[in-house]
Image: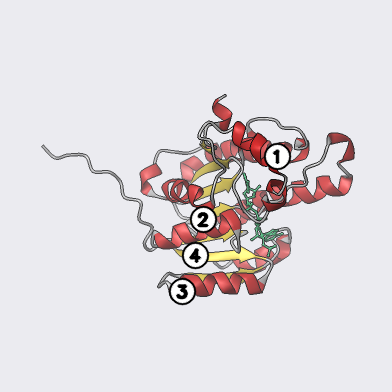
Amino acid sequence: MSLPQTPNQRLDGKRALVTGASQGIGLAAACALAQAGAAVTLVARSQDKLDTVVSALQGAGLAAQALALDVNDQAVIERHLSHQTFDILVNNAGTNRPKPLGEVSADDYTAVMELNVRASYFLTQAVVATMPAGGSVINISSQMGHVGAANRSLYCASKAAIEGMTRAMAVELGPHGIRVNSVCPTFIETPMTQPYFAEPDFRESVIAKIPLGRLGQIEDIMGPVVFLASPAAGLVTGSALMVDGGWTAH
Ligand code: NAP
């Protein structure tokens, strides 16, 4: 008999665009895709930080280029991306302003919703216009798109919006052969979360809610991103891949 073969997770010949790729989760996603064979375009605002990461990737023999821009600037996005085609898009650039409900300002609301939701929405619109069949959109969401937490009403609202947009776009883009999924991490140690974990009580309270008993590291999202980008996930769309150590299983 001929045995079924596991679809491979190589991405040779594919082009990927990763936002927020100069540090943290986006940096790990960009490295993972490049290590799997994709040519990766790394986006962030800081040219210096991007250049450092791209030099390291190129020094390791991987295909990478920097594209310094603000994903909130739709005109700039259209100017830079209208003539480019990508097989993989990772919407990762995001932010958080944790505050009690009563202290959230209109400025907080605009900053979080514009970057976490609006920028991802319109970047996806621009990129899928030329994305070929077989393409994959991966939204870096959060466990907070599925559960609530104190001081996170705004962040949870933004990530729940990402979850809704992921499902709706999966339905609409399925007939074009484009898959859309989200990755939902628990707390990962990155520059964004560093200040939170400076408080030992907060750190302990987070670890207590994670059945696997540890905070996430950026390496934890690398396998899930490559999987969702690859033919191994060929029938996976509209899904939320929890990378949460079991937080949401409670
Ligand atoms: P981070 O360390 O703060 O990194 C954010 C990245 O986004 C940086 O590369 C930053 O570079 C870039 N960026 C920010 N604003 C941008 C803009 N307007 N245009 C282009 N790039 C921009 O964040 P992180 O902790 O890695 O989190 C990344 C994503 O994962 C976010 O969507 C976050 O909500 C999600 N997430 C994080 C955790 C966690 O515990 N860390 C958990 C669940 C989900 P520049 O400042 O140079 O632009």
Q: Earlier in the sequence, mark 2 or mark 4?
A: 2
* Mark 1, other Cα within 10 Å: few <14 / some 14–19 / many ≥20: few
For marks 1 and 3 on the same chain, the one whose residue lies earlier in the sequence: 3
| Label 2 element class | helix
The residue pinned by badge 4 equals 40
Q: Please state the horizontal and vertical placement of residue 5, each as a whole percent of the image.
A: 23, 43
Q: Is mark 2 within 8 Å of ligand 1?
A: no
Image quarter where the N terminus lies is top left
Is residue 3 toward the left or the right of residue 73 in the image? left
Instruction: Examine the rendered structure and indicate whether residue 20 appears above or below residue 65.
Output: above
**Residue 98 rendering spot, x and y as whole percentages:** 77, 43
Tags 4 and 1 touching, CB below 8 Å: no
Q: Quarter for ligand 1?
A: bottom right
* Residue 159 can be seen in this image: yes
Q: How far apart are the two marked residues, 4 and 1, measured between alpha carbons?
A: 36 Å
Which callout, 2 or 1, points to the residue nearer the camera? 1
| Alpha carbon separation for disc pair 3 and 4 | 11 Å
Estimate how packed mark 4 is, as few (under 14), some (14 to 19) or many (20 or more) residues with alpha carbons within 10 Å.
many
Q: Amino acid at mark 1?
A: Phe
- The residue wearing badge 2 is 29
Marks 2/1: CA–CA distance: 27 Å
Q: Along the line of sight, which residue is nearer the eye, 245 or 166? A: 245
**Kind of residue indicated by mark 3:** Gln
In the picture, the disc for residue 202 is 1
